[in-house]
Amino acid sequence: MTILLVTAPAGREGDAILELEWALGKVRVRGTDWRGVLLAETPLSKKEAIGRLKNFETQAIQRVVPLDLIVPARREEIEKAVLEVAKRIDGTFAVRAKVRGNKRMSQRELEIGLGSLIVEAFGLKVNLSDPDYTVAVEVLGKKAGIGLVGRGELLRFEVVE
């Protein structure tokens, strides 16, 4: 089961859902409390899902972030999940956080704190400009998605609004 956080222009969520269905076949997509932010689950492997979306002609999908885990948005839960996915890093890394709907967390503090935690735990090297892996932390209110994203697995598309 692969979980994808997908963004689309506000008001174009319906188009993005249709495109995900066309590109992935079997997929369950849920809206979130944030305009333009969707969560998709597919039985396809991460590699297969990313491959299909990479080659798909999209009009509404802007970003696709593969996630490994969804946890409660509490610092200790996020730290535990990040350490779990960071075990698989073999190379350089960067932490990228996006916080929506949670006033108690700061993106910058999360990125620095989680990056330090990974360095202490595993002795890995940080590379902010061109990392082998990105630890993606997507906070959506009371939940947080954590993903270990290899180079080329984070998809960005130009969408004409």
Image (cartoon, helix red, strand yellow):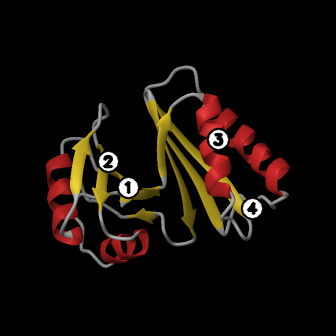
| Residue 106 horizontal/vertical position (percent) | 61, 29
Task: Mark 1 and mark 2 in contact? Answer it, CB < 8 Å.
Answer: yes
Residue 80 numbered mark, or none: 3
- Along the viewing direction, whichever of 91 and 98 lies nearer the viewer: 91
Q: Give the residue type at disc 4.
A: Asn
N-terminal of the pair, mark 1 or mark 2, is 1
Q: How many angstroms separate mark 1 from mark 3 (CA)? A: 19 Å
| Residue 140 horizontal/vertical position (percent) | 42, 34
N-terminal of the pair, mark 2 or mark 4, is 2
Q: Residue at x 57, y 20 (%)?
A: 104
Q: How many angstroms separate mark 1 from mark 2 (CA)? A: 7 Å
N-terminal of the pair, mark 4 or mark 3, is 3
Q: Give the residue type at disc 2.
A: Leu
Q: Which residue is mark 2?
A: 39
Q: Relative to 135, say whether 77 is above or below.
A: above
* Left or right of 158, for residue 108: right
Quadrant of the rendered image containing residue 52:
bottom left
Callout 2: SS: strand
* Left or right of 150, for residue 1: left
Q: Residue at x 62, y 30 (%)?
A: 75
Callout 4: SS: loop
Q: Which residue is mark 4?
A: 127
Q: Relative to 5, say whether 18 is above or below.
A: below
Q: Which residue is mark 1?
A: 3
